[in-house]
Amino acid sequence: MTTVFKPLIIASSIVFLTACGGGGGSSDDDDNDNDPGNSEELAIDTSNAKGITIDAYRSAYFTQGATDFVDLTAKRVAGKGVSVDEMSFNEKVILLSGFRDTTVVDCAEGGTITLTFTDALPEGASAGDSFDINADNCSNGISTQNGGVSFEINSFSETDASFTFSYNNLNITSGSDTVNANGSITMSVSDNGTTETISITSSQLSISYNSDVVTLTNYSVIATLTGFTATLDADYTITTPEGSVTVTTDPRFEGPTFNACPIVGTMTISGSDGTSVSLNADTGNANTMLLTINNGSSVTTDTIVCSELL
């Protein structure tokens, strides 16, 4: 398994921004249909364990950018101020076009983007409100966007909110790099005044970066932030052309922030024939984690520096 989540972290950031209107798309030459890959379980051994571990760790945290995105989205739907600098490219297009209901906008460097807004209830943000973006070779001079993405409010209140993002062959091309996304993801956030909880789930989400494609299946990550303590529970399957592995955290990861290495908890990545690799945070050193590789016949241990995982 190749380590592909570093570019996919960047790719997912673009995708999340595009869900609110930012980013660009792809050229018509791109024919990436996000093949889910090889569903057969991958055998884990010392030759691939480190790369698999890095991919698994990054796939748990690659939606970390969604936290800021949810906060910004909550500000938007709650009617709180969002500066022009915080707006994405397409949001600025919407602002300048005086967007209402369905609008077709000519993009700055060619192509069009169709924006559709459905307002379920007239008195502000409410369940059923949706926003759809469909691009046809829409170029802003830096990137080109094709395909569709939709955003829907499932529920919204002062303390709880849930949003679903659906990607329909969304393509983003910038220079020689192409990102493609298919599938949907649901993000829910709640805040009781003491603890903020963010849940990110997806039955299937495929994201590709150039020739690398990863599919997340039955994806579930639940993160909490209480004061200076952050926790993360993960449970899902990663599928690549090389094969698939399952990822779980038990006990859950716990640390000072989502940007720092956890200091408590274990992530286990399971492959075929009883093979596995685990990442244990209880090393007594905030900068390292313990890597334990079980190739089915023997067990080896090593340490990994946290900076390699991020």
Image (cartoon, helix red, strand yellow):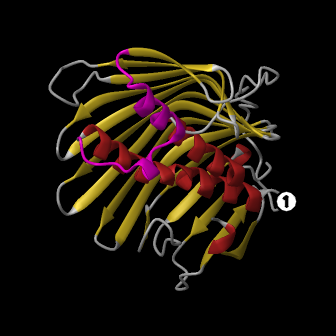
Which secondary structure lies at badge 1? loop
Q: Position of residue 74 (x, y in %)?
A: 30, 44
Is residue 85 within the magenta segment?
A: yes
Circle 1 is placed at which residue position?
A: 47
Q: Is residue 304 at least partly visible in the picture?
A: yes
Q: Residue at x 72, y 43 (%)?
A: 272
Q: Which residues are magenta?
A: 79-101
Q: Is residue 20 at least partly visible in the picture?
A: no
Q: Nearer the viewer, residue 173 or 55?
A: 173
Considering only vertical position in the picture, is 129 above or below 240?
Answer: above
Q: Would residue 5 be found to the left or right of residue 101 on screen?
A: right
Q: Residue 51's quadrant in the figure?
A: bottom right
Q: Nearer the viewer, residue 298 or 247?
A: 247
Q: Position of residue 88 (x, y in %)?
A: 50, 42
Q: Position of residue 242 (x, y in %)?
A: 80, 40
Q: Residue 152's quadrant in the figure?
A: top left
Considering only vertical position in the picture, is 56 above or below 117?
Answer: below
Q: Amino acid at mark 1?
A: Ser
Q: Nearer the viewer, residue 61 or 132?
A: 132
Q: Residue at x 54, y 42 (%)?
A: 236
Q: Nearer the viewer, residue 156 or 40?
A: 156
Q: Residue at x 52, y 64 (%)?
A: 266
